[in-house]
Amino acid sequence: MEITRNNIDALNATIKITVTKDDYQSKVDSSLKDIQRKAVFKGFRPGKAPLGLVKKEFNARTKADEINKIVSKELMNYLKENKVDYMGEPMPSESHTDIVYDYEKDETFDFYIDIALAPEFDTDIDSNLSLKQYVINIEDSAIDKAVEQYKNAAGKQQPAEVSGEKSFLKGEVYQIDSDNVRISDGLSNRTSMLVDRVKDEEQKKKFIGRKVGDEITFDLTQIFPNENEAKALLNNKMIDFKTMNVNFAFKIEEISDFVQGELNQEVYDRFFGKDKVHNEEELREQIKEQFKDGYASESDIKLLIDAKKALLESNTFDVPVAAMERWLLTLDEYKNLDRETLKQRFPNLKDDIKWNLIENKIVKKNNIEISEDEELEAAKDLTAQEFARYGLMPSQIPDDMLDNFAKERLAKNQDRSMIRSQVISQKITKLVKEKATLTQENISYEDFAKLFE
């Protein structure tokens, strides 16, 4: 066997592996004998067919299998022994697609494999990295708004006699004819709607100042110009504004208005845990701490974005983009794409590849590791954030429940990989805060948000 390497350029190489009969024949013979012991041929008892008959049927296939195993094993050994730092996976060479192997007749085989080489560079985070660290001001108006949100969270719908702009209406919607008479076999549905969802101000007036039993007639396309909202109102996915009669009526059966709740101990305990908050002053302090933590996290995100940008600009090495595109298209999640679509999906692929290499270098140089406990805590934080989007605060989630959800998430390879990536980003951010030269700048949240535009 002979293995040679041809460096096409600094980032791409082709490895040639020549396999001869001496390399594979004994393995092929052994595999054929194993097939002979198990094969069933017509006219022969199991395992008693002549070896010549087995060879005639299975020789080429067996030979191809054994040679491919040898090539794969020897390639990996070569890359390991020669410490070849490559990216993606080795792939059949695009420059030798015209080679056709005859596994029945040929005895010597040449295989050409393309390798994407990792660029040589050196980088780390140190005082030469100069960045702004934004300190976001906590405005009283933001705290006021948050207090109102807690009042809303404690509020509820209460019956009302007359509808207003914010009222919630329950009733029946049904099709009518040009004389405003209900069509017996027309579309209808028992449903509910918020008056505030009607965006056309003239149409909205029809629903304000109404009482139970009132019938409101309207053009469906004017009330809900978005066809999907109209479909939801009628619970009918098949409606088509272009062909249907859009004259409808809504008969009110219930009216309710949202009333804010009072801030009391029950509300405080529900959102913050028993006896953690006792009055509005303490509530405002809790909210301030929440903003402080949230703003610090957002500031860290911006800091890492700026650090990545600076490190990408200061590290001018190139990467084998074309080879990596080709490799990505072999993966299950992208195999149905073509290169043009892949480029549209990953417009910054070159920078993504570069950052992955820079990140790995920083992780290795600083001995960054992730423990199972850190993975679990990160998974729990992510799960708690998702519960919070549905109004369930961390204090309302039992520890064992949060633990189980987090463990289920870590059992999924894709989720675990994403969580590990997040933890690494947090550790690199911490490293930036410790080693880089940072200049603090106070900023309003409104101006901070503009930095992402």
Image: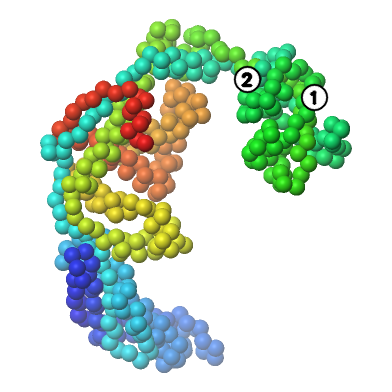
Q: Quadrant of residue 326?
A: bottom left
Whole-percent x, y for residue 140 in the image: 38, 13
Give the answer, above or below, for where 11 lies relative to 293. Answer: below
Q: Is residue 166 left or right of residue 68?
A: right
- Tell me the element at label 2: loop
Q: Is residue 339 above or below residue 350?
A: below
Q: Residue at x 78, y 41 (%)?
A: 245
Give the label on residue 416, or none: none
**Residue 166 image label:** 2
Residue picked out by circle 1: 215
Task: Indicate the amino acid at tag 2.
Answer: Lys
Q: Nearer the viewer, residue 193 or 84?
A: 193
Q: Residue furthest left?
A: 127
Three-letter amino acid code at the position of disc 1: Glu
Judge from the rendering whether residue 436 lies leftward or rightward of residue 289; answer left or right.
Answer: left
What percent of the width, then of the height, locates residue 204? 67, 25
Q: Decide: is 178 above or below 33.
A: above
Q: Is 282 positioned to the left or the right of 266 in the image?
A: left
